[in-house]
Image (cartoon, rainbow, N blue to C red):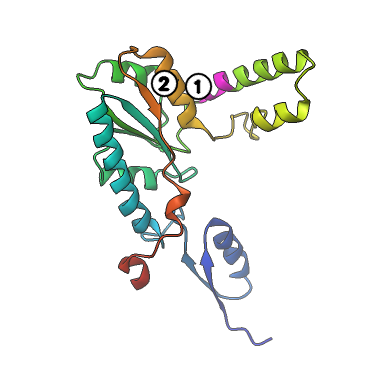
Amino acid sequence: IGLEGFVTIGGDDTARNAAVIDKIVPCIHIPKTIDRDIWGTEETLGYHRFVRRASQDATALELDAQSTERLYVTEVMGRDCGELTFGTFRHSRASMALIPETPFNIEKLIEHIAGMNDPRGLLLVAEGAEDQDLMWRHAADIIIFREALASGGIIPQGLIDQHFPLPQIDAFGNVKKGGIADMVTFELQQNLPQKMPIVRMPDLGYQYRSMDPLKADLDL
């Protein structure tokens, strides 16, 4: 049909498809992924816009946590890549951050926070951050709770499945990621001194995807 090549624009899936097509027809791919998670790219459309706004909101949460003497926990989008979380942490006043590139241990995190002179502030948790032991423990709790609800014969199974879905296990036997900030918040609430309220705040994520582009995005 006379095609000399393609220019594709999109995220991970589009990039993978472009790589296949490129074996037949030359392709140039423009990485339009806010997560900044495509290998070999230094810049992606939307990343700077996200970090700029999320870092402002993170700083506001940090200051509020300081003034109300609380520890806030929020989850940051990005799947298996910690670029958005680390970028937001680096450009804000957030106290701590957990990223996928460095698996954490919940017991050591609790010990670290308990030993801080001033634990007030904001903890950023990347949605891909993981402690497999923690995730397995919470998965087991969900299974036990589901069985207890079902044994009563009062709550329909459909409602149980809707509100307490079974944990998903990948091909390597790992619990699939999701809701890690909720798990971290629960563990901190259960194991840190009660004089320090631990509050789960709204996620920093999809609300930034539809914002007006920055000049850097337009130039790119």
The percent position of residue 216, horizontal first and vertical second, equals 32, 66
Q: Is residue 4 above or below residue 205?
A: below
The residue sitting at the right extreme is 153
Residue 199 in picture, x, y percent from top left: 39, 27
Q: Position of residue 186 (x, y in %)?
A: 46, 21
Q: To which residue does mark 1 refer?
A: 134
Mark nearer the N terminus (2 vs 1): 2
Judge whether residue 4 is colored magenta: no
Q: Place residue 187 in its image quadrant.
A: top left
Q: Residue at x 35, y 30 (%)?
A: 72
Q: What is the number of the mark on residue 106?
A: 2
Q: Give amino acid for label 1.
A: Leu
Question: Looking at the image, can residue 35 be seen?
Answer: no
The secondary structure that dominates the magenta segment is helix
**Horizontally, is 167 left or right of 178 in the view?**
right
Figure check: 80 above or below 67: below
Q: Which is more toward the observer, 84 or 196?
A: 196
At x 31% / y 68%, what residue is drawn? 215
Identity of the residue drawn at 27% across and 41% down: 60
Residue 191 position by quadrant: top left
Magenta residues, as a range? 132-138
Q: Is residue 153 above or below residue 62?
A: above
